[in-house]
């Protein structure tokens, strides 16, 4: 089993890189793969699974920006006092927040955290999905379910570039990559492919040929999915 990592440039509508990794190398470890391709002023939009404080600090050093969801287990502290912030209590008090904080403990990173309440229908759906995912390793607390009532993003894009709502609008662009993956899966019929033991080099060669076909074939499907989303 393998993982495919890729970066998609929304400006040029082209792929920055492809990388085939062992399934044991998770998304968090792959978060820094984008660093060699970054230029000053670039924006990296990543899913929650790629949360990596070291990578965030390196992005900042390059003069670039990042945008990602906040992970429930991540500690945030006051930028001045260093005291831990009870995010749920703060949200209940203020309703929405736009605040500079420190994220993490071992490799803290200065970030802007923005949060707003979602519609009740959206919150209810999130809670239903979370209950379906429950297992021994993810026995969600009542506080976790309450946090699902908010959209929470972390970024280093300052307020003079993005207003409050623009941080949420920008994150919607990440769904371009989701559409692409959906088109790939459809093109390659991945859910029905059987995996057999074979030489690693042969496996990579076959995969690359399949991927080339999927990239070419998915362009029409990508356009189709975009139309559906706009509808």
Image (tube, rainbow, N blue to C red):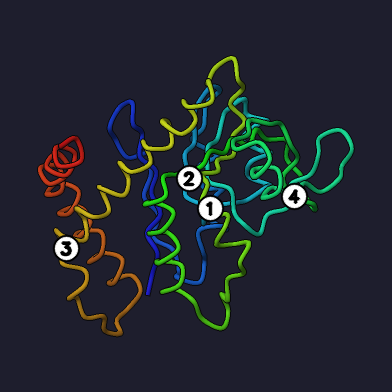
* Spot occupied by residue 175 in the image (x, y as percentages of width and height): 33, 43
Residue 124 in the figure: left or right of residue 147: left
Q: Which residue is mark 4?
A: 86
Q: Which residue is mark 2?
A: 46
Q: Are the residues flagged by discs 2 and 1 in contact, CB closer than 8 Å?
A: yes
Mark closer to the chain start, 2 or 4: 2
Residue closest to the eye, 215 or 67 = 67
Query: Going 21% across and 68% down the picture, which residue do you hit?
Result: 190
Q: Is residue 197 above or below residue 175?
A: below
Mark closer to the chain start, 1 or 4: 1
Secondary element under disc 3, as helix, strand or loop, is: helix
Query: Going 35% across and 39% down the picture, which residue do you hit?
Result: 8
Q: Which residue is mark 1?
A: 50
For label 2, the crowd category at 10 Å Cα-Cα, with few meaning under 14, some 14 to 19 and many 20 or more, is: some
Mark closer to the chain start, 4 or 3: 4
* Spot occupied by residue 197 in the image (x, y as percentages of width and height): 30, 85
Q: Which residue is mark 3?
A: 188
């Amino acid at each position: 089993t393998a993982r495919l990592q890729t970066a998609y440039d929304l400006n040029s509508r082209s792929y920055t890189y492809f990388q085939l990794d062992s399934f044991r190398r998770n998304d968090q470890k792959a978060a820094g793969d984008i660093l060699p391709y970054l230029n000053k002023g670039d924006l990296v939009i990543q899913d929650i699974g790629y949360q990596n404080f070291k990578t965030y600090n390196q992005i900042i050093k390059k003069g670039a920006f990042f945008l990602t969801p906040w992970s429930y287990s991540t500690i945030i502290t006051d930028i001045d006092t260093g005291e831990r912030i009870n995010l749920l209590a703060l949200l209940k008090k203020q309703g929405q927040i736009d605040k500079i904080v420190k994220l993490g403990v071992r490799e803290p990173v200065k970030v802007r955290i923005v949060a707003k309440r979602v519609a009740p229908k959206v919150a209810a759906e999130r809670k239903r999905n979370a209950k379906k995912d429950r297992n021994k390793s993810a026995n969600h607390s009542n506080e976790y379910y309450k946090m699902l009532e908010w959209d929470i993003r972390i970024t280093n894009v300052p307020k003079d570039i993005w207003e409050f709502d623009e941080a949420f609008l920008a994150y919607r662009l990440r769904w371009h990559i989701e559409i692409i993956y959906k088109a790939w899966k459809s093109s390659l019929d991945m859910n029905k492919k059987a995996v057999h033991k074979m030489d690693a080099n042969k496996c990579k060669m076959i995969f690359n040929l399949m991927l080339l076909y999927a990239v070419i074939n998915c362009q029409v499907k990508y356009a189709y999915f975009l139309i559906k989303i706009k509808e």
